[in-house]
Image: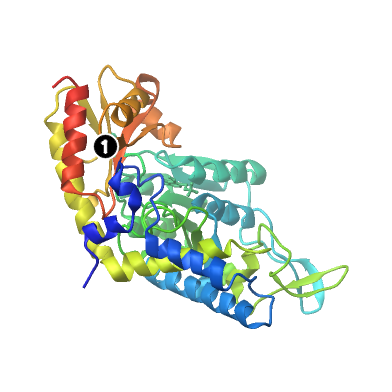
Amino acid sequence: MPLTPEQVRAHIPLTAKYIYLDNCATTPVPKPVVEAMLEYFYDYCANVERGAYSIASLANEKWDLARAKAAKLLLNCKADEFIFTRNTTEAICMVAYALEHPLLDRVNGSFGEQEPIIKWEKGDNIVFSELEHHSNMMPWIRLARHVGAEIKVVPFNRETGQIEPSEVEKVVDERTKVLAIQHVSNVTGVIHPVEEFVKIAKEANPNCLVVIDGSQGPGHMPIDVKRIGCDAYAFSGHKGPLGPQGSGGLFVRSELLERMEPMEIGGGTIADVTTHDYKLRDDVLCKRWEAGTPSIACLIGLGRAAEYVAEEIGLERVRKREEELTEQFIEGLLDIPNVEIYGETEDMSIKAGVVSFNIRGWSSHDISMALDNEFKPPILVRAGHHCAIPACRALGVYERYGGTVRASFHYYNTPEEVEAALKAIRKLAGA
Ligand SMILES: Cc1ncc(COP(=O)(O)O)c(C=O)c1O
């Protein structure tokens, strides 16, 4: 039997004290995930990839299993195409780094730089959308500066909050070397048609690399990176997957992975080292990117979390529940005078469990403070620019409200919590 929302709530003690509606920023970690991490600390706390003794082998086995689970259940990719990261931000930086620095390695006995993945030439461009999180904008702005590429930006629809395929089509061209674009917006909550974006980019330039910021996707809905057809897909373990903070993942297509220069090198990444050169490991390609001792407990936690959210709850079930809570919340907000809602309000099939709004006459920050301080149990929502200042400027809310108030749901939230939040917002809006 799948876990019910009540059973999941029993695994999250925070739900007894707060109405937590900030799952877009991070999610509380359920007890079974914490227990898997504790088991590592108490029973087999040893380093991975180094020891021969029994608990070191056990730690290694569990760490490898965690990767296989997270890869299969959250992205539907192979384990050796799945790099463990700290979060989405680190994952995107790793890709941008590799597109600036050619792979340095010993190949056929000689040590030197390999062919770069992209031979940057004058007139090349990098495309991203105006709706991106800073983490999927800044690494590309820096890369463009360093390699002399032009930046081209896809606008989003101000009414629906969606990045439309036709707009992507207008911006990408045969000189587009990278399209970096999000799967789900953390501002408007819209789920974008990323599969279509990939087709459009590859039609414009078959060599264009498509990097997806999937920070708000996995764990909230089934994801299949092979079906999407992207070259790389980055996500955070501490959001939808219900994993610990400090865990995340990056899928990279294996042909690309072979040619990518790791951002960090050292222990754990090599097949051989001399005082003057080195040969990077190629037995398990993804491990080239995991220099030094990893955050073992967190990553074992991510594997357990993948199992919990995908097998014990079920991703279709998570998606359906979030859709229902979102619809209920939007319907309630639409009835409150003085409330502005940003992004799609009708078609729930393109809407994730993320709703941005403001009350006229209030700053977004003050609403968040009031919902926390003036109501019992406190209602915890995010306020501000959500690390997407260009998107907030485009919506006209950055200067006016300091951004938006954002409520974001997960499976364990309840219709009663949504109603309590609506009642509180009605009160603040003077309705
Ligand atoms: C769309 C999007 N991209 C990237 C990030 C960055 O995630 P992290 O802070 O886990 O690296 C976030 C975080 O909220 C996000 O919503």
**Who is closer to the viewer here, 153 or 47?**
47
Q: Quadrant of residue 309?
A: bottom left
Which residue is drawn at the image coordinates 47% and 50% (left, top)? 180
Which residue is drawn at the image coordinates 49% and 64% (left, top)? 37
- Above or below residue 163? Residue 99 is below
SS assignment at label 1 = loop
- Above or below residue 13? Residue 35 is below
Which residue is drawn at the image coordinates 43% and 32% (left, top)? 390
Q: Quadrant of residue 113?
A: bottom right
Residue lying at the far top in this picture: please name it.
361
Q: Quadrant of the C terminus?
A: top left
Q: Specify whether residue 346 is in view.
A: no
- Above or below residue 127? Residue 66 is below
Residue lying at the far front in this picture: please name it.
42
What crowding class fits label 1: few (fewer than 14 Cα within 10 Å), some (14-19), or many (20 or more)?
some
Q: Quadrant of the N terminus?
A: bottom left
Q: Could you tell me residue 172's position as x and y percent?
A: 44, 49
Q: Specify whether residue 185 is in view.
A: yes
Determine whether the beta carbon of the residue marked 1 sits less than 8 angstroms from the nearest atom of ligand 1: no
Q: Could you tell me residue 407's position as x and y percent?
A: 29, 39
Q: Could you tell me residue 93's position as x and y percent?
A: 58, 51
Question: What colouring method underlies this structural image?
Answer: rainbow
Residue lying at the far left in this picture: please name it.
335
Q: Quadrant of residue 385?
A: top left
User: Which residue position is annotated with label 1?
Assistant: 377
Q: Could you tell me residue 218's position as x and y percent?
A: 37, 59
Amino acid under label 1?
Pro
**Who is closer to the viewer here, 209 or 72?**
72
